[in-house]
Image (cartoon, grey):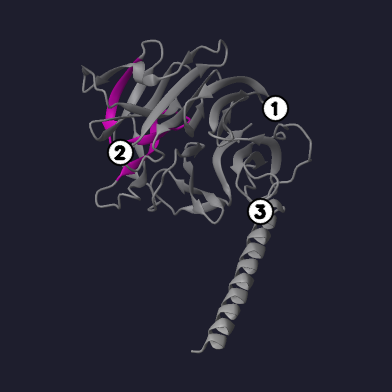
Amino acid sequence: MNRKTRLAVLLFAVVLLGTVGTAAVLRAADRSAVRDRQQAGGPGGRRGAGPRAPARGRRVGVRNLAWGPHRDEIAAVPAGQPQGPRTASGVKCLRFHATAGTGICLQAERGALQDTYQAVVLDSHLRVRHRFPAPGIPTRARVSPTGHTVAWTVFVSGDSYAGTAFSTRTAIADTRTWALDDNLEQYAVVKDGRPYHASDTNIWGVTFADDNRFYATLATGGRTYLVRGDRTARTLTTLHANVECPSLSPDGTRIAYKKRVPGASPDAPWRLYVLDLATMKETATAEHRNIDDQALWSGNGTLVYALPGDYGSDLWTVPADGSGTARRMMTSAVAPAYLG
């Protein structure tokens, strides 16, 4: 190849690379513009409007993941029409739960060098009542049936329950006095009927029975346990092994949870189960995919949970008694809570 030919080839390559690069930039800009546009089926809202409470009637509040100006806001839909139009609130949360006129919203404050996080207690109109600093990445949130107590869990190291290299911090706050138990690892543990002490304990995923009693996950020695918590006695008592992210049924008789199943992939270890607290009998649900969520009860017969979707997560439902099949409830949503 002579010198002129080499120069011609080089010039053609430069032009081609420039064209490809320009096209890539244009495609990226187009994707960014799409993210900012209202997505079909996404929530509507008024620019500049403050937070709005859900309309009357039972509704579902979710963290909206549909691309558009209201992504990551809490949005509400009628419980009977979960695929219907969503009403945006203007309040952004990474995790959310609400009941009895009280909400808990875990938020991120984006910083130039480091993000910070907070747990925000909201009223029935989603207005701020109180703020607590949170020492890590939000992962779980729950409100007691009366709305008088709230709980949240954050990762203080690591960012996944799938492995062992993580540490959590779980707190419970009283919404009447703002008294705070900022680390449930300070509670006394009773394991197999005896006091238990270990430096590797982690606690996460609170679900409330009432303002004093709750259930949660305790991890120690490479295993996980369902524990019953008592805020007055400041104790955690183990009840059953291989339970993570428990969720108590409205009638207080059963716990939905994710369970590690033998032979599953380390990256997808969990299936959704239900535990009868009177008999300690486990029932596998008809959902056979990997569940990394704290399920929510819709009444005493149905579970709601998140699975990966096209835009982050979709919400699915399945009967709690092991019958039926899993069905998609909502697209582009996570962190559901029944309101009203």
Q: In the image, which residues are magenta?
A: 235-260
In this picture, is 331 found above or below 20? above
CA gap, disc 3 and disc 1:
28 Å
Query: In the picture provided, is 84 more to the left or to the right than 139?
Result: right
Q: Position of residue 151 (x, y in %)?
A: 48, 24
- Tell me which residue sits at (64%, 68%) in the image: 23
Q: Inspect the image, locate mark 3, and give the three-letter code of the amino acid beneath it.
A: Arg
Location of residue 155 by image quarter? top left
Q: Which mark is residue 164?
A: 2
Q: Residue furthest front?
A: 3
**Mark 2 against mark 1, which lies toward the viewer?**
2
Q: Which residue is mark 3?
A: 35
Q: Is residue 287 above or below residue 113?
A: below
Query: Is residue 115 something that shows in the picture?
Result: yes
Determine crowd level at label 1: few under 14, some 14-19, many 20+ residues with C-alpha closer than 10 A.
Answer: some
**Of the residues under marks 3 and 2, which one precedes in the sequence?**
3
Which quadrant of the view contains residue 183? top left
* Quadrant including the C terminus: top right
Q: Nearer the viewer, residue 338 or 205?
A: 205
Q: What amino acid is found at the position of numbered circle 2 in the picture?
A: Thr
- Residue at x-position 56% and y-position 79%: 10
192 in relation to 94, above or below: above
Q: Residue at x 62, y 33 (%)?
A: 339
Which of pointers 2 and 1 lies earlier in the amino acid sequence?
Answer: 1
Left-right relation of 80 to 243: right
* Image mark for residue 253: none
